[in-house]
Image (spheres, helix red, strand yellow):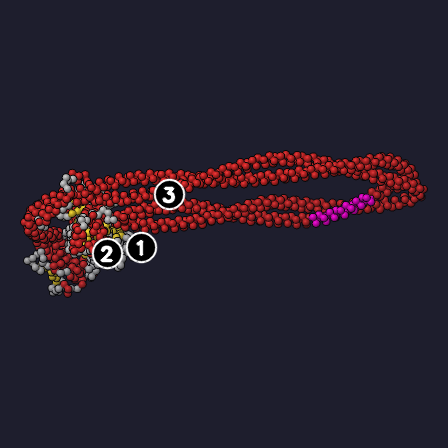
Amino acid sequence: MTEPENFPIFLKGIHIQGFKSFADRVKLELGQGLSVIVGPNGSGKSNVADAVRWVLGEQSAKSLRGAKMEDVIFSGSTQRRPVGMAEVSLIFDNSTGIFPLDFREVTITRRAYRDGESQYLINKALSRLKDIQELFMDTGAGKEGFSIIGQGRVEEILNLKSEERRSLIEEAAGITKFRFRKREALKRLDDTVLNLQRLEDIVQEIEEQLTPLAAQAQVAEQSLALAEEQRELEIQAVVLDVTEVKEKLSAGESNSETLQAELVSAQASLARKEGLNLEDKVNLKHMDETIQCQQNEAFQAEQAINALNHELNLRIERTGYFDEQITRLAREQIVDEERLQGVHERINTLEAKQIVLKHTVGKAQQNVKLQEQILSEARKNNGAKQIEHIKADLFDALAAQSHCSNELTGTQHTLLSLEQQVGQLGQERLQKETELELLQDKQMAQEKEQKEIERAQRITEVERVRLVGESEKFKELLREKHLGLQKLINQEDQTKARLHALQALEDNLEGYQRGVREVMQAKKKGIPEGVGLCGTVAELIKVEEDYELALETALGAGLQNVIAESEQAAKGAIHYLKSRQLGRATFLPLDVIQGTQMSVLPSVQKDPGFVGIALELIDFEEKYRPAIASLLGRIAVVRDMDAATRVARFSGYKLRIVTLEGDQVHPGGSLSGGSVQRKGGNLLGRSREIDSLREALKRLKTERSQKEQERAEIEKNQHRLQTELEQITLEQHEKQEHLVMHRTQLESMAIQIGRFTEDVQVAAYRYLEAMEQKTERSLALEGIKDRLAAAEKKSIVLREELHSREQEAKTAAESLEAVGEQLTLEKIQLAKWEQELSQCLEALEQEHLVFQDQESGLKLKLQSLEDVQIARSGVEEEKATFVNQLEVQSQSQADLQFRLMQKRQEREVLAVRVLEWEADIQKKREEVHTLEQRLHANELRVARWETEWQTGLTRLTEEFALSWEEALPYKPVEERSTIGQRIQEIKQQIKALGPINQAAIETYPKMLSRHEFMLSQQEDLIEANQTLRQLIAELDKIMIERFAESFEAVNQAFKDVFKELFKGGSAELCLVDPEHLLETGVEIIVQPPGKKQQLLSLLSGGERALTAIALLFALLRVKPSPFCLLDEIEASLDDANVQRFAEYIHRLSHSTQFIVISHRKGTMESADILYGITMEESGVSKLLSVRLDERTDQNESA
């Protein structure tokens, strides 16, 4: 395949995001030559063509294969959420300057959002669809051009009507922009003709109005002169009336000041007396408290005296008791001394007896000792000595045997005892350890319980702190509610006072002129002349507060106009006023009065400062509309003076215009305005304020009831919180006591555990010690058994030897028996004397002990006697002290009783003075009440005069646009009646002039100027009409020339391309009406090879498609398009024709950039770049791209 020649790339790239199946951002970077987009059916490859057509301005959802435009936004899949925006961008190379923009690269972008919003951008700058359409005009690349051919477009080209098919030739001829300019020129021409017709009608209408308007202007000027004179006279009359009212007002205000001063003085005196009375009441209360305190002190003093008497009596009783004790102890002392003396004598007797017995025992002991020596010597001579030695040895052996036997028995018993002791100690040790474990478990349970109590106490403390905080909050809320309630009560009182004052003004019709007051009073009283009256204008209309000032200004004195049901009723009321000389009033009879409402120009309605017609800004019953409309139907209300002047200009200064601030623009252009003083006496706002005050009073009562309920609820909550706080405090104290008890128990348990731990350690030590002793004793038992056997053997030998020796000594022993008997007698006597001596010593020792006891008892009694005497002295001293205290306390009680009597006398004087204050204060309050009533009545008169004063000032301001200072120079010297007579004369003269058009004075010159202006405009439009017709003729000429040239070129190209694609045959384009090239249709005549000429409808599908492709290629040959996008237009061709299509399109790709969507093999083989559209993920298209050289390299390597 040959490489395409290099040429500038026009469409450099297509960027798609969120459009149809392209959920992710996709970039098609396009290059030179032929780019083919391929992919399986349903993969979304045709969505690329839809995206290009959409970004170039396609508005039909059906053309984009959707039901609505929102369908172009990716709607989500099983794995993805829908997106909120679709965006497509086309990047164009503008290096050749094909676009009239100063950029080398131009990006066209379109965005669509789900909320229906759509945006067009050129190089990221917001643009209009029209801008994009003009940009592509005559390039062949527009939405309607031949550069984008979709699947159905091929068949559509052949099925087009001949007149519609000519648009393809016009696109190739480049006359689309000329046709667009012609359409614009024709539209302007139609507008010009229409405007010219309207101007002619306006000029004719103006000419018809000019002549009568001149006459009306002359009459209006005469009327203005008379009206000016009338205005000055009316100002003079108002000044006289206002001056009279002002004098009354000044006198009334002076009287109010005098009454106010008297009231202030009386109130001050009342306050001073109430203050003194309050001070005396406070002193009386303090005195009562003092008397109560002194009574308490007197009672306490009496109780103290009684206590002292009681203590003194106790001391007297104790003194008598001590005297009895001293007497008793003295008697016992004498008895004890006598007993002590008897014991002392017995001791002396026993000591003498002891000396004698000691001497006798000594002599007897010496005699026994001598006899024993004699007996011993005799026995030595008889062999007794050897026997004694043998006996001694035997005794030692027997002693050793007995000792060993005893030791053996003792050791055995010890071992048995040790075994028992080891068992007992083991059990004791185990028991101690068990008890220790139980105690430790009990300690752990106690500690756990203590922690639970501590945790509960912490929770309780937190709850208590919370309750304290909430209680404080409720206290603060209660205080705020109390203050708020007090504030509401004050507001309610103020509102009631204001309502009563305004209601009094309303009931008395204060502020109305005398005549109006009289007829309205007659209506209220049911007088026949007042029966047919409906009410004043001020009473019968309702106005929002924002519009009050404007409506007061608009109505002026008309607020006091009285609406009557009929003309007859109005006449009756006027007769009533005249016959009784009760003043004047203006009446609006509903059966004859005609009120109209003006229509507002659209320019006035569109003005931001325009509020509305005054009639539309108020509420009233529909039956009063004629009367109200006669006053307000032709008055406009605007926001400020700037808006007023604008609206006046729009309306030609024919309207009366009032601002919300009370400024005015009068018909003809005069202005009035300035500051306005409003003191609540205005008639229009008074009834509204009364209604507002009633509503406010009702609201305040509701709020007050609500506040009282809220306060009661808060008090209830406060009481509940206090109860909860007391309960939780009690619980906290109980928990604290339990905690202290548990801590004490834990401390006791700790001591017990320490003691038990020591016991366990001691038991273990004793157990181990017993085990060691048992082991030692077991070892010692064997040695004892050996020593016992040796001792037994030795004792046997010694017994045998002793027996032999004793036989020998038996004979010698008989001789010594007599000596032994004598010795025995002496020993018995000695034992008697020794026993008697021992008894004597014991008796002596016993008597010594008795003596010591008696002596100690005597000392104790003496000490007791001394202690009792000391105690009696102390009681005597205490008795003297109590006697002194009793005297002092009695004197203090007498003083207290005296002071108490004085205080009671002073209280009686103060109580009488308080009663006198109360009577004086009551008189002073009645005086204050009388002054308040006088002041209130005077203030009502002042309010009425102030209302009349304000009414006069308002009339000066509203009717004459004058302040009081500006009106003072008008004060006349004539009488009020003379001025009124002259006013009536002027009114008659004005009435004689007939209907007057005041606006004619200014309208006539303006109308004349407008007539001249319209004539000049008419000439300009005629000239513009001629210019546009010349432009259209020139455009027709250019389009005819270009269409003829292009038609011949396209026809020739179509013939050539048809033969090349069909390999023969013929085809041509024919004009339906060659004489009218601008409207003629274009027919297609074809003759495939080997067939006759026939209609297009009789061709096969492939032939029809190839014919349309031939026409497309012919158009591209005559006017090459910078790029061309073809969407499966060769789908119906057979393989041979596809091959021819592919070769031909490849040849054209040297001059035109082609993007072809196809699934045919022949087309794909001709591509320079292949783009694959796949749908790996359900519902989401993905892009793959392969350049031809890369693909070829891959095939070769394979």
Say which element carries label 1: loop
Q: Which residue is mark 2?
A: 69
Say which element carries label 3: helix
Count residues near mark 3 (Cα–Cα under 10 Å), then give few for <14, some for 14-19, many for 20+. few
Q: Mark 1 belongs to which amino acid?
A: Arg
Distance from disc 2 to disc 3, alpha carbons, whole Å, reads 91 Å
Q: Mark 3 belongs to which amino acid?
A: Gln
Q: Which residue is mark 1?
A: 81
Q: Mark 2 belongs to which amino acid?
A: Met
Q: Which residue is pictured at 18% across the width and 52% down the height?
A: 576
Q: Which residue is mark 3?
A: 922
Q: Which residue is pictured at 12% across the width and 47% down the height?
A: 984
Residue 460: x, y in percent?
A: 48, 47
**Closer to the observer: label 1 or label 3?**
3
Which badge, 1 or 3, is on the more N-terminal residue?
1
Q: Which residue is pictured at 22% across the width and 40% down the height?
A: 247
Which badge, 2 or 3, is on the more N-terminal residue?
2
Q: Image quadrant for the C terminus?
A: bottom left
Q: Nearer the viewer, residue 562 or 150?
A: 562
The part of the chain drawn in magenta is: 397-421
Count residues near mark 2 (Cα–Cα under 10 Å), then give few for <14, some for 14-19, many for 20+. some
Q: Is residue 1124 left or right of residue 707?
A: left
Let me know if residue 1184 appears in the view. no
Distance from disc 1 to disc 3, alpha carbons, whole Å, reads 88 Å
Q: Nearer the viewer, residue 131 or 1016?
A: 1016
Q: Is residue 672 magenta?
A: no
Residue 1057: x, y in percent?
A: 14, 57
- Would you say the residues marked 1 and 3 are in contact, meaning their CB atoms lie under 8 Å apart? no
Distance from disc 2 to disc 1, alpha carbons, whole Å, reads 19 Å
Which badge, 2 or 1, is on the more N-terminal residue?
2
